[in-house]
Image (cartoon, grey):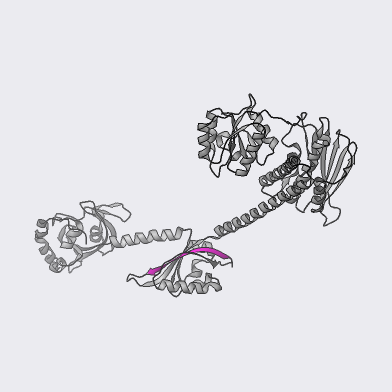
Amino acid sequence: MSRNLFTQADVNRPHGQGEDSGRDLGIDTKLLEILPVAVYITDANGFITFYNEAAAEFWGQRPELHKTKWSGSCRFYTVDGEEILPEKGPIAETLRTGEPSRIECITERPDGTRIHTLSFPSPLKDGDGNIIGAINLLTDDSERHQRAEAFTRLAAIVSSSDDAIVTKTLSGRVTTWNKSATRIFGWEEREMIGQPITKIIPPELWNEETRILARIGRGEHIDHYETVRLAKDGRRVDVSLTVSPLHDRAGKVIGASKVARDISEKKRTEEMQQLLLGELNHRVKNTLAIVQSIATQTLHSAHSPQEFAKTFSGRVQALARAHTLFTRDAWQGTDIHDLVREQLLLNDEDDNRISFSGTALALEPQSALSLSMILHELGTNARKYGALSVPGGQLSLTWDVSAPGEPGNEPRMTLQWVERGGPLVHSPLRHGFGSTLIEKGLKAHGGEASIQYDPKGLICEISLPLPKGTQMGFSFPVSFTGQHAASPARESFNLGGKRILVIEDEPLVSMDIEACLSEAGSAVVGPAASVARARQLIESETFDAALVDANLGGETVEELAEALAQRNIPFLFLTGYGRDSLPEGFRDFGIIGKPYTREQLLAATDSMLAPGLAKTA
């Protein structure tokens, strides 16, 4: 019952002629007075002639009899909130039509409170059937309306949910089935209502459903657990389920509500992550095995520790350059033009002694890796003993693809390596690692090589089968010829007495950098393995330049770069990534790509310190 809005004087105020009006209409108002529901009477003109205490409580006021018309409420509204004029209200319509009715509306009290109301006006007639008044019964329908609104909201949530929401009896029969259940499992609502829930459960998991129903019967809630369900088309759908008991008004468990979330995509992602981790593990270990083999084979052929270090470093560099291309191309296929450029030019695009051309095609990673190491060995030999060891030498590399001779045969790529203008060539007295690598590396992929030690210059012909599906470009060849004479390799660096801050979190790399700089006469500040330590050294130490690892254990080095730039101290980034990994405001700064040789590290540091070349913000 609504709260009492009247004074004690109001309560004690007699209804006066209300009782007489009731008797005039042939109604025992004493009976109406004790009813717990709001009742009032009007005459044929709509003036209120009687109302009981429940009506006064309902209206929140005591209207004056024979002067208040239609109702004791201040205002009427439709359930949609549109105001109803008093002369169009329930009593007025009943007096006009002479018919009883049932009307749902909203009534407003003097304090502004609004009540969802069910109104049951009926006409009062005399013995001749003439309308002499009307009686109206009012009930507060707010609670039912609130429940209906809550149910409507809940139904909307269930209908629009991305999750399958299903209810079932304790015997496992489906009672409700939302749209997402249809979307996920394929069964329409009409196909599932009344059906056993086992229709979407794999037979081997029926015992799971039996255990769930037993727990629900005990009133237990079952939190998220992952399982499998069957779709209409036979697919097995990975789902995450939550199951809750459904109770009647007495609190008795009468069924269960299931919320099923499709986690198929999540499962596929997890499987893909595991696959990628496995592939990464394989490739890392395979790469380490290759490096180990390179080290072993290089050691066998090296005549001194210095030769070993230089040759081994060069071969690891070749491997790294190949892997950079593979990573860029997502290990799908490497452009042979890019591969040749990386292995022959060694970042010297101006070397006019080197030319190469051939059909555009993409090599799969295994063939590309083998070819990259072979090109590195040939290029190293040319720089040490052949055409590229003198300013006037020439190196030409061409390749072409031949169509298969018979059905089922793969196309073959043929490369021709020709050196001219270098020192006089003699056949070697023994086969070294390079020759063995060329021979066995090609043989492993069904290829072969022919090397001619022509006095005018070495000639190497390579034939390599291409797997089916190899992507090939247009028929015309891509080509490259350098524009300027190559600069001679630098053998000495002006780093004596320079103080270099080293910021690097990998101890072995840091030790190698420190050793290289110390051998060149520089003093190393640090090294710093963290942002905090590097910040401390920048603020407290004096130094000429800095080498900054672009990633310190996952921490950004942007603040370090800004601090160095503010002090106008030149620096280079050390990174195994591209420029996109650098702090946004410093992507045009110099990079030393990992892994690097001693000569590359010292040459880049020397150039950074050269007058007019230092890069600062």
Residue farthest toward the top in the current orientation of the protein = 611
User: Residue 597 location in percent, x, y?
Assistant: 69, 38
User: Residue 83 location in percent, x, y?
Assistant: 28, 51
Q: Which residues are magenta?
A: 234-246
Q: Quadrant of residue 218?
A: bottom left
Q: Is residue 308 visible?
A: yes
Query: 510 and 21: which one is in front?
Result: 510
Is 395 one of the magenta-colored residues? no
* Quadrant of the frame with the C terminus: top right
Q: In terms of secondary structure, what is the magenta stretch mainly?
A: strand
Residue 272 in the figure: left or right of residue 191: right
Give the residue at x 61% y 55%. 277
User: Residue 155 location in percent, x, y?
Assistant: 41, 61
Residue 92 in the figure: left or right of residue 416: left
Q: Quadrant of residue 315?
A: top right
User: Residue 616 location in percent, x, y?
Assistant: 58, 28
